[in-house]
Each structure stands twice: as structure tokens, then as C-alpha cells.
Amino acid sequence: MQLAVHREANPSERRVAVTPRIASLLATRDIEVVVASGAGDRASFSNETYLQAGATVTESPSGDVNVLVGPPPPEQIEGLPEGSVVIGFLDPFTNTDLLTAITAKKLTAIAFEAVPRTTLAQMMDALSSQATAAGYAAVLKGAAAASHFLPMLTTAAGTIPPAKVLVLGTGVAGLQAIATAKRLGAVTSAYDIRPEAREQVESLGARFVAAPTAEDAATEGGYAKEVATDMQQLQLAALAPVVAESDLVIATAQIPGRPAPLLVTTEMVTAMRPGSAIVDIAASTGGNCEATVADEEVDINGVTVLGPTDLPSRVATDASEMYARNLASMLELLVVDGELTIDLGNEIMAGACVAHAGEIRHALSRKAMGIE
């Protein structure tokens, strides 16, 4: 069975789907790894390291299974063998052009966004591994943008108090942001609509913000879901004074298949002290901050609002290693005795497979395509 590792189409994407270490591991499973020349360069993995790991390096790979990190453009899909498998973050709930190209080639599409959030699927949960990278990178980016030290410093010039960091949303990215801000010495607080988040926040040594929570605010998979308009207004009113006194806000709240919830209005930003900063991890889905512009820096009365969409790429070496481990676990389901085996009776595969044999399978993808 041949596994093709493709170059990423997005010029800001530095990660690579398979690292040399994982390529070497896959070789022991009778999987032939073929890597596009230069695919790992921006993650600090040279062609030579892949060759040393037993992989083949070529200009335009193509295989039984084709792997990427981000979604490929439709024209790249057209070049894949009909009936082959494509795996990656495929944006399967909104990218209808890609879904159309996938079904036209009768590809089996496995999207990491659709991996079930179950104990059995934890090793394949690339959303969580990359959210960990994003939460860490967001705090470092915010620390650089804010005009304050994060830790308390006692110097001959006097004592500088620690910065106040607020984390909005306590999924994997939010929890990692809390842990990172605490390691850097900031006074850290956090908020999530889900009441069960309080225990997680406090276990990391942060303060849970006294704002409205809702018992029914999480899906069966553990993701937050949309709240009613009256609840959102209560949230905004409770968060406004906390945002105003924060030196750095890390916003991470997202809802699968939906726009990110609004948690910080422009009016709330103007109430923050000049020199403060907001890093909005949810920028790619509209942002938690009303002033966020994806991949741009916005200045509002001296407050810097950042909307980076490439945070895991900023720690590309380790983020790639984590992603490749998730992929290797997924391949354990797909490759049996060196042969490609697509078992849609397996609950993980059934959930992650968004398209197969010309048919859109996932409910959210079918909805995006207008299929009843």
C-alpha cells in the first residue's frame, strides 16, 4: 500500500502531514511512504531526513492514500487516482467545491474535523492536538503584542505587577492557553458557557469568571453549542468589566459547523487599557471579538486585536509531529496486513468518513451540499 504525502497548497501552512519519524514507523507496517519534494522543509524536515527514514521523495506523489494537513484545492483532487483515499483537515462542512471534486473522483474522504470525540478515537483526534499547539502559540503571540510583562518582576527599578490574562472558551486550546499563561506568571482567569468547565479551569490554578453558564450548552460530543440571544446578552454584560481590566484576552470559543459566538464587542475593546491585546483563535470562523479581522492586526484606541489563522503552523515542527501521530493511528484502522481496508462498520471510520464511492456521507456535509 502506497501513502502519498503532499505539499500544502496554503502558502502560510508550515506543517507537514507525515514526519520522518512516523514515515519510519509506517514502513514497519508494510506502508510505502512517498513524499513530495520539499513538503517538510518549512517544518524543518529535509528531503534527506525522509530518505534516511526509508521514504521515497518525488516531485508529484500519488498513492492509494493521500495525506495533507489543510484542504487541497479542487484541482489537486482532480490529479488523484479515482477511488483512492484522501485524509486531512478538509473543511468538510462548508467547502462545497472540494466536496464536489471528491465525489466526482469517487474518493474516500476522511476528515479529521469529523473524528468522533470518544475515548476510542482519542489517538486520532487531530483537532485536539492542533488546538493544543494553537493555545500555546496564541499566548506567546499575545505576550509579544501586549506592552506588559506577563510575570511579576521584582527589580532594582521597583516591582512590576503581573499581567491579567483572560481566556474565553475552555476547550483544548483554551486549557492550553490557561496553562501557558500560568507558566509565564500571569494572573489568569477564564470563562466558558459550560458549567463543567469550572473544575478544569480551577485545576489549572486559574479563576473561573462569574458569568452565566447553561447546563444544556454542550453537545453529546462535548463541544459548546449556540445559546439563545437573551443568554448571549447576559454573557456580554457579565464579561464586559472582566475584559476591561485584562491586559491580554485569548479568545478560543468555537462551534463546529457554525460561526464563532460573539463574546467581545467593539465597545468592550474600547474600554480596555491602551497597550492591551486580544488574540482571537476563532478568527477563521468569524471571531469571538467583533473587531477581529482574520490574519490582520487591528488597532482600536491603542488595543491590538489579532486574528491569526495559522497558529499551529507557528510551532510547525512539534505540531507536525503531533498531527503525524494522529494520522498513524488513523492508518491502523485503514491498513490491515498492508492492504487498504475501508470498514464503514467501524464507528470511528463511519464518523470520520465524509464521502465514499461518490456519496456524501456526513450529515453536516450533506446539509452544506443541500442534500436531504
Image (cartoon, grey):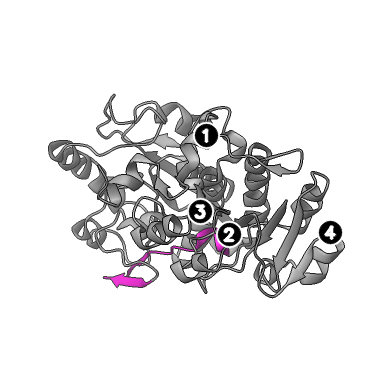
Q: Residues within 10 Å of mark 1 (few under 14, many from 20)?
A: few
Q: Quadrant of residue 222?
A: top left
Query: What mark, if any, has residue 53 been given in the picture?
Result: 4
User: Which residue was labeled with disc 1?
Assistant: 344
- Type of amino acid at the residue the image marks with label 1: Leu
Q: Residues within 10 Å of mark 4 (few under 14, many from 20)?
A: some
Residue ID at (44%, 40%): 171
**In the visual, does 264 lie left or right of 131?**
left
> Residue 213: where, in percent of width, then height?
28, 30
- Report the number of numbered marks: 4
**In the visual, does 359 lie left or right of 204?**
left
Query: What mark, if any, has residue 212 been given in the picture?
Result: none
Of mark 2 and mark 1, the one earlier in the sequence is: 2
2 vs 1, front mark: 1
Magenta includes 301?
yes
User: Which residue was labeled with disc 2?
Assistant: 68
Q: Which residues are magenta?
A: 296-313
Secondary structure, mark 2, is loop
Task: Report the front residue among 225 and 364.
Answer: 364
Of mark 3 and mark 2, the one earlier in the sequence is: 2
Task: Report the front residue among 69 and 156.
Answer: 69
4 vs 1, front mark: 1
Query: What mark, if any, has residue 107 been given in the picture?
Result: 3
3 vs 2, front mark: 3
What is the CA distance from the residue labelled 2 to the residue labelled 1? 22 Å
- Type of amino acid at the residue the image marks with label 4: Ala
